[in-house]
Every structure is written in C-alpha cells, then in structure tokens.
Amino acid sequence: MSRFITITLDTRGVTCRARLLEDEAPRTCAAVWDALPLSAPVFHGKYARNEIYTLLPRFGDDPGKENTTVTPIPGDVCWFTFDGADLGNPAYGYETEREHRAAGEGGIVDLAVFYGRNNLLINGDQGWVPGNVFGEIVEGLPEMARACQDVWMGGARGETLTLARAEG
C-alpha cells in the first residue's frame, strides 16, 4: 500500500499530495518518512528553473544515490545532500546564519518540489547535481504550481514549506 505526504506553502495556504516512490527510492523515502513533519523557510531555485525547496540540517541516514535525475519533471519531489561548504558561499544568497552554519557543520538536506517543465540540475560551481526522486505529486499540482510561481515573482520571505504525513 502506498504512503503519501502533504507538501504545503504555509503562508499561501496551498497544499498538494505526493505519493512516496518506495519501490524506486526506498532509502530516501524511509529517511523522509521517519523525520516527518519537516518545516523550514522556502526558497525558489535560481539554476534549476521551476523549483521550490527547503534546506534542513542533515537527518537520518544519508540514503546515497537512488532513482536519480538531472532533468526532473513537473510533480517530482527530490532529495539532495550537500556537504560542508557546497552551499556555504555567500554568493548563493542565503541570508540567515542558520543556513550558512548548516552548510558548514555536517551538511544539509535539500528537499525540492518541481512544478514546471524544462528543469536542468546543473550548478556553475558544482556541475551536475543529481537528485533522488522520492515522490510524485498526485493531487493539487496546478494549484501548487501557481503558488510556486508566486514565490518566484512575489518573493519567498516569510514563507515556509512543510512536509507531513498524509492521512489515509
């Protein structure tokens, strides 16, 4: 039986539902499921195009690479792990000491939602950045995409992204 999570842009009041891809990414799904609920400030992607994401201090066992992609499609939910100074450079634009500290002390987990087409996971400093696809949005993608576009055009300040276990 499939397990589901909700993904919410809290201030905007928009929620979608994603099915965990437990056959394709069992370690990643287990790490996320065991850590839920998770909530932190949201960011909009600079390089990948149609992406929102949140940065969290590392949790659980690092799943390693599984079900990876560098071309996520609309509705993909991905996990990225970054070490040390991968994202600690001030040029990335993270404003809080928390994000800089997390990047420098034990690394961070980046949980991302892709809401549109033509994404390409390449970073000028890092090169290709494959992500583990561990979920697919099955309900509410059009509404979430509109809200994500508003994060891009209206700004992310004050917005949080929350992932939680879905009922039923």
Image (cartoon, rainbow, N blue to C red):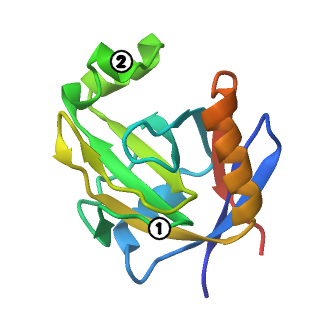
Q: Position of residue 4 (x, y in %)?
A: 64, 71
Q: Residue at x 80, y 39 (%)?
A: 12
Q: Quadrant of the C terminus?
A: bottom right
Mark 2: give few (<14), some (14-19) or many (20+) Cα within 10 Å: many
Numbered mark located on residue 73 in the image: 1
Numbered mark located on residue 100 in the image: 2
Circle count: 2
Q: Residue at x 35, y 62 (%)?
A: 132
Q: Secondary structure at mark 2?
A: helix
Q: Position of residue 36 (x, y in %)?
A: 59, 52
Q: Is residue 157 left or right of residue 52?
A: right
- Which amino acid is tagged 2? His
Mark 1: give few (<14), some (14-19) or many (20+) Cα within 10 Å: some
Q: Quadrant of the N terminus?
A: bottom right
Task: Using the numbered discs, state the Cα–Cα distance from disc 1 to disc 2 in whole angstroms.
Answer: 29 Å
Outermost residue on the right side: it is 13
Q: Is residue 43 left or right of residue 160?
A: left
Q: Residue 47 lies in what quarter of the image?
A: top left
Q: Position of residue 6 (x, y in %)?
A: 69, 59
Which of the two residues, 123 or 32, is positioned nearer the viewer here? 123
Q: Residue 99 lies in what quarter of the image?
A: top left
